Image (cartoon, rainbow, N blue to C red):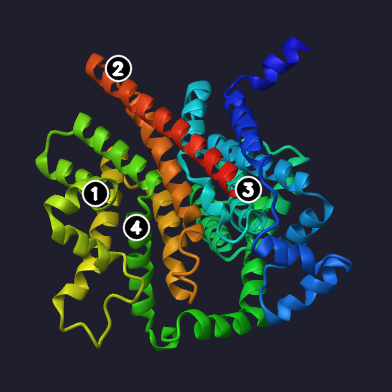
Amino acid sequence: MKEKVKKFLENGRGAIFALFLLELLLMIFITPNKYDDKTFLESVTGTTIFSYVGPRYFTWTSRFIIEYVLCGVLKISKYLWILLEAVMVALAGYSISRIFVKDNKKENNIMLLFMILVYPITIMNSAGWAATTINYMWPLATCLFALIPIRKIWDGEKIKFFEYPLYVLALIFAGNQEQTCAILCGTYILFTILMIIKNKKIHPFMIIQTILIIASIIFILTCPGNYVRNSEEIVDLFQDFEMLTFLDKLSLGFTSTMGVIIKQGNVVFLMLTTLITIYIFSNYKEKLYRIVAIIPLLSILLLSVTKGITDSIFPFLASFRDLITKEQVMLTAANSNNLLNVVPLVFSYINFVCIALSILLIFKNLKNNIAILVFLVGLASRIIIGFSPTVFSSAERTMIFFDFSMIIVSILIWQELIKKNDKTDKKIQKRTECAIKTFGILQYLNVLLCILFTQK
């Protein structure tokens, strides 16, 4: 028995199991009975789930599968949600490890564990713990799991027969959420094309998955409830939304994303930009490269992390922060004569471009640069929220896919950073590792305290 347990925990699986246990410990203190959780639970009490969820396809949402699962889980038991939520967080960690962690699985998975703990999971309480996690964390986990076949097929690895239905079910569930559906559709189409170019043929399972995710997109786009909901949300949340042009919505996606990062002091963004700065400063002496690398880090440090100090010394930095975090369209035809309105958009572009350029410098090429692809896909998943009237009302929770893309890029950069064997580099690596692990522990304790203080 001891040998079986040891074998199960080897090759980095111990860190994933630890992630499961840590999340289970957090969730055990939660009773999902507030906000949307309460609404869903009351709506299916004494009636069938389908009688409630079915009509919502015509009146509110295309998330039929997600809401059916949500109602089913709440109706059965809160303990089922607690268990499955811990499983989903662990599944996200496992999938990231399986796709992106190449060598030294044990140590790198431990690092990945702490990087995931850095993510403030308290965001998942914004509309009720169960409702928010099942609509965001679970699609994220199943989306990442549904991407594993791409890695296996690309590497020429055999997919076991029992894995096929698991990957299909994961893709169908994740495909029922708009952001993960877009991520999966874009990724599967891209790699289908790349595999045809590379191998002059394509694995049949890639075709099946691509067809399924395209069908999911069609299901979302043809859902009458989505249009009803969109109209109601425009009236309730963003009355000027229909007056915006395509470019207005695109720029809104950029500025609102950067606004949330600065306003909330996004710790995942801070971790990524810190790792980028450390790597560039350790490996490049060119001033231009260093300036490009440090701009995003300085942005969040000066405008968010140390705002209490910087505001007292540089009071107009507070005014600048208020401008870039304002919940409105920054630049329109009506206000374009005022140069100040251009600043938030330019500021957002500069930060994201600097990160992208730094990633290119770290991995030294564009071809086969999976890190830049992950970053851009994650960023795009948040920018498309600019095309929804809920861009401000659901700001933080819609960042989860971008946040986890930054976690993935962080673990990829970390793997590059530890390749250096110089004595000075080893000191930097050790300090960086200690800082991230400390931050992960503190964030975990912060989440635990938040749950204990807010749960009855």
Q: CA distance from mark 4 to mark 3?
A: 26 Å
The spot of residue 270 in percent (x, y) is 33, 44
Name the residue type under label 4: Lys
Above or below 2: residue 119 = below
- The residue indicated by pointer 3 is 455
Q: What secondary structure is found at the residue carrying circle 2?
A: loop
- The residue indicated by pointer 4 is 263
Q: CA distance from mark 4 to mark 1?
A: 13 Å
Q: What secondary structure is found at the residue carrying circle 1?
A: helix
Left or right of 73: which side holds 205? left
Q: CA distance from mark 1 to mark 3?
A: 30 Å
- The residue indicated by pointer 2 is 421
* The N terminus lies in quadrant: top right
Where is residue 359, by image quadrant? Answer: top left
Which residue is at 77% across, 61% downward? 71
Which residue is at 45% across, 81% downward? 238
Q: CA distance from mark 3 to mark 2?
A: 48 Å
Nearer the observer, disc 3 or disc 2?
A: 3
- The residue indicated by pointer 1 is 308
Left or right of 390: which side holds 438? left
Name the residue type under label 1: Gly
Nearer the observer, disc 1 or disc 2?
A: 1
Q: What secondary structure is found at the residue carrying circle 4?
A: helix
Say whether residue 218 is visible.
yes
The spot of residue 409 in percent (x, y) is 40, 42
